[in-house]
Image (cartoon, rainbow, N blue to C red):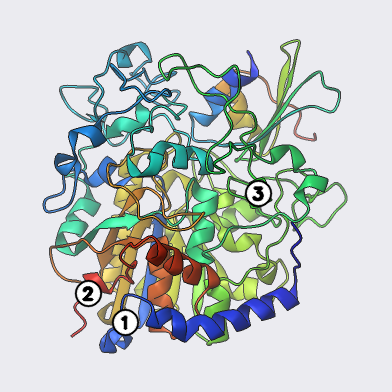
Amino acid sequence: MKRSYGLALFSSTLALCVAASSAAFAAGPGDPPADIAKIETVVVIFAENRAFDNLYGHFPGAEGIDQASKESLQQRDRDGSVLPELPPVWDGLTAKGVTPPVTQAMTEHLPNEPFTVNDAKGFNVPLSVATHDLWHRFYQNQMQINGGRNDMFVAWADSGAMPMSNWDASKTEMWAVAQKYVLADHFFMGGFGGSFFNHQWLICACAPYYPNADRSPAKPSISVTDESGTALKIADNSPKSARDGIPKFVSDGNLTPDFYAVNTMQPPYQPSGNNPAPGGDPRMADPANPTTLPPQTEPTIGDMLSLKHITWAWYSGAWQYTLDHGNHEPIPNFQYHHQPFNYYANYAPGTEARREHLRDAGLGGVSFIQAIDDGALPQVSFYKPQGNLNEHSGYSDIQAGDRHIADVIAHLEKSPQWPHMLVVVTYDENGGIWDHVAPPKGDRWGPATRIPAIIVSPFAKRGYVDHTRYDTTSILRFITERFELPVLHGIVVRDKAVAAHGEPPLGDLTGGLDLN
Amino acid sequence: MDVDRIVALVTAAGIELTDRRRNAKDDGWSLSFANGATVELGDDGSARAAGKGARTVARLLDMPTAPRST
């Protein structure tokens, strides 16, 4: 359980990364294209909580719902039997306050198959309406995937039929962007579970760690797993059937039994969901709060970029607003756990690195858009839309985020930096929603459920569906190759694990580009 | 309202449960959510929301919030 922290660990890990760099690329999917240097500006836009089939299940040329086998469309109960029908959406399909609501009673007796939320002959709920959120947690996600069969999404959900929902998104603005450029139809979440964990995978390809958790306030948050180590231990009083209610577990916490943080914990620095300690530094979150994660020290892609003097920034919508005024809902509904660098000691309050790299995107992304228009983006930018614009179930709708991201794309296309730009628009994770394609077999942490990804660039193939297998770390692969960075340890481990399972290597996004 | 009902109503609104434990007196539940709200639920059925995001959680549960100073 012991793990040392601090500069020594960073230095040694960095040295390992440097040493592993050439070997990792030699074992990878091939050398990067010679002309990869044509890409001078990389922009990553990270939306929230949509599986591929949820939005792009009927996209022409993509492996969508129409290509799914009958077996993969049917959900099984907790005992392995095929469900005769889907359970209702517990507490209703629409979010609280939506009028007219789609109540739980209205979702009774749905056939055991996917359903379209905005089907005019069905629920007819428009894309502008927020719907019921779903569990999207580390162990449940693995239980739902069920070894690649994807037939236990309903069984291990807290939302009844909701995982089988999808939308006709063919009229959305981002659908049109995908038609114009490249839709990647085999892009998978980097890690199992939710936003906290997958934001960490976007920047670190690592699992955060809570040292000595069994002697900390977080001790009750240590999960109890079954003998497989990949599933939660089911409580004696858990309903036996998905039709009878939400499952119960012995301990469904944030930490693995060996203290890795896999479900949502709060940043140790403000803005954090946790207040400062009474009388403590107002820039910090109370370290005694059981949901405050201690500062992390693993190397990130930001560290690697800084090491090579590549300019970069994490642009966060409503960051400064929240620091100055506190959070407000429903707008901007800032999400503390969507800010991955705010968990790292290297970007602690008062550091030059924080001032330089953690930037306010403004309300509605206005400052980020200004930087786009001015041609002032750094070489690598990550953009996180504020809560009401991120497409997350429960508190946000698809239409608002879709229009916002499409607007950002329109500005990027007109930017002075556009001629040498690569933009990747993807989602952090599936939001607990079913997808029919089995994820590649990898390591302990992922890859997980398939999510949408759109590659936008003057070098993107036009009107193309890229079937190359990617995961969230493929973004890091591209950045690493383009800027000749040391390879993060988690990518080396992932590549070896995928190869050990006999799976094809995960790509670096260049499958969607024509750089020649 | 029981603890499972509170968790179901809040998480359905996209606000993740981040901690659930018996309180120090072992006479109720202490819940934490991703928006910073905490809910103290007594075994006698009393409930109170506090912390960041408390107003949103209280609205979802149709319950009053604690004074802002707590």
Callout in the foreground (3, 2): 2
**Residue positioned 33% across, 18% down in the render:** A100
Q: Is residue A361 visible?
A: no
The chain carrying label 1 is A
Give A350 or A222, whichever is nearer the viewer.
A222
User: Above or below — where is A369 with respect to A214?
Assistant: below
Q: Is residue A276 visible?
A: yes
Q: Quadrant of the N terminus of chain A?
A: bottom right
User: Above or below — where is A293 with respect to A495?
Assistant: above
Dot 3 or dot 2, earlier in sequence: 3
- Other-residue count near label 3 (Cα within 10 Å), few / some / many at <14 / 14–19 / ≥20: many
Residue beneath disc 1: A39
Dot 1 or dot 2, earlier in sequence: 1
Q: Quadrant of the C terminus of chain A?
A: bottom left
Give A243 or A403, whichever is nearer the viewer.
A243
* Residue A513 numbered mark, or none: 2
* Residue A266 numbered mark, or none: 3
Dot 1 or dot 3, earlier in sequence: 1
